Image: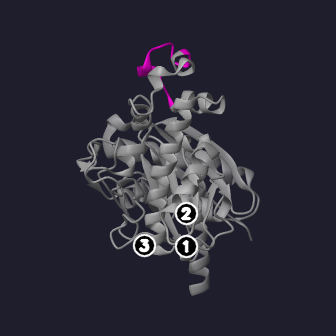
Amino acid sequence: MPSWALGIDLGGTNIKIAVVDELKGILFEDTQPTDAAAGPEGVVRQLAFMADAIYQRAAEALDTGFFAGIGLGAPGAVDAEKGTLSYPPNLPGWGRYDLRDQLQMRLEQAHGLRSVVIIENDANAAAYGEAIFGGGNAFRDFMLVTLGTGVGGGIILDRKLYRGPSGTAGEIGFMIIDFEGESVHAGIRGTIEGLIGKERIVELACSPEMGASRSPRLNELCSRDFSHLSPRHLEQAAKEGDAAALRTWERIGAILGVGLANITALMDIRKFVIGGGISAAGELIFKPAMMQLHRSTLPSMHDGLEIVPARLGNKAGIYGAAALCFNAAQSSNRDD
């Protein structure tokens, strides 16, 4: 009997929730601005209200199927076993919080909904979503890398999430590429995120070496106000052949490629799924990243190297959170 679950992606700006069928994918979905100012208790109230509303809608519409539970992807350090979320970025005042237990209790006491709740780091949830439903479906082992405001990652080994003993494995954005460089991010010098996070991409383009200010097309796209220059402008200009934009994407891809090469050398992972908003630049990033990945690894490591685009977009976390519920339900059935 097919299962269905609720998948939730908790962000500092929005909460996205969906009913996910393990065979058909997303059936219903909703998005609301995150009431971050209300603190953890207020956000839990909001999560419970949204979960109950969409659950009731699905329960009325779905005639068959087993409800596998509620999966929640959240930013920050997640202890999946204890159900805690610690110091999530863009959610002020949280500290270390028992998110799973508080959400379960709120659902039952305020809404009468008893459900298994599984929480996971948002990048890990996205990686698992791509493994089950998306671009990593064909791979037994791979790493998801998300390129956006920051640079995140999640590792899949033997079709299972690898979290590490503290739940922080896969944080490729904090891998150091240039320990003597000028870029300092979160107090650490020369990290990948500090070099190719969204804001740093624009800074890189405007550097004398890349020469965005000398590009007539980029001047036109940002109306000569480079504080308004965006990665989308750089993407458009590069596709039109603009030299400064092309140089910028080549550098971004090379930096990413060095990071991927380090992962290959350390873990023998040779498949990489690249997602996030910046990845929309496609081959402008993928081609130089692949070239650098080859240059930065031994010939004996070249077999099977592959970079592919993520397929689920900003819904990967929702899919992954729900898929964790399907997996937990199947494991429970096997144990029984």
Q: Which residues are magenta?
A: 220-230
Q: Earlier in the sequence, mark 2 or mark 1?
A: 2
> Can the viewer see residue 176 in this picture?
yes
Residue 54 visible in this rendered orientation of the protein: no
Question: Residue 36, image x and y in percent?
Answer: 36, 37
Mark 1 belongs to which amino acid?
A: Pro
Per the image, label 2 sits on a secondary structure element best described as helix
Is tag 1's residue or tag 3's residue first in the polypeptide sequence? 3
Which residue type does callout 3 highlight?
A: Leu
Q: Which residue is mark 2?
A: 294
Q: Observer-nearest residue: 315 or 230?
A: 230
Q: Is residue 21 above or below residue 209?
A: below
The answer to whether the residue labelled 1 contacts the one labelled 3, judged by CB atoms less than 8 Å apart, is no
How far apart are labels 2 and 1 at the CA level?
8 Å
**Residue 141 position in % (x across, y down):** 57, 72
Residue found farthest to the left:
187
Is residue 106 magenta-colored?
Answer: no
What residue is pinned by disc 3? 266
How far separated are the C-alphas under marks 2 and 3?
A: 15 Å
Q: Earlier in the sequence, mark 2 or mark 3?
A: 3
Which residue carries the number 1 mark? 299
Q: Which circle, 2 or 3, is nearer the viewer?
A: 2
Q: Are marks 2 and 3 in contact (CB under 8 Å)?
A: no
